[in-house]
Amino acid sequence: ALDGSGEKKQVEKILFKKHEEIFRLPYYQQLVSNGVPRWQHNIAWAKEEAKNRGLLNRPSDSGRGIWELTERGKSYK
């Protein structure tokens, strides 16, 4: 939706809309670490896992707060 790169808030907004039916459930609305909803916390952990697998660039490559797919991430199925 963002052509492989976007700001954190943009990515979260798109993911929330795509999975809104699930993320609106009380379990995912519970506040967890740092007072954020569980759905948002889970997305952050998924982003870290994608980064560790080489699917997302590190902030030093893309810029702080920018989530950018690597070439491997763009071709991941």
Image (tube, rainbow, N blue to C red):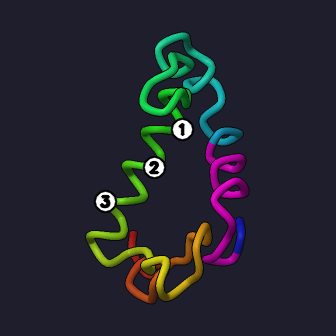
Residue 35 in magenta stretch = no
Q: What residue is at 36 percent from the left and 70 percent from the top?
A: 51
SS assignment at label 2: helix
| C-alpha separation, residue under disc 1 versus residue under disc 3 | 14 Å
In the picture, measured across the screen, residue 44 lies left or right of residue 18, that is left
Does 71 appear above or below 68? below
In the picture, measured across the screen, residue 38 lies left or right of residue 16, that is left
Q: Amino acid at mark 3?
A: Glu
Q: Determine the main secondary structure of the stretch shown in magenta.
A: helix
SS assignment at label 3: helix
Q: Residue 40: which numbered mark, if any?
A: 1
Q: Residue 49: which numbered mark, if any?
A: 3
Q: Residue 44: which numbered mark, if any?
A: 2
Q: Amino acid at mark 2?
A: Ala
The picture quadrant where one finds residue 77 is bottom left
Mark 2 and mark 1 residues within 8 Å of each other at the beta carbon? yes
| C-alpha separation, residue under disc 3 versus residue under disc 2 | 9 Å
Q: What residue is at 55 percent from the left and 77 percent from the top?
A: 68
Q: Which residues are magenta?
A: 3-15
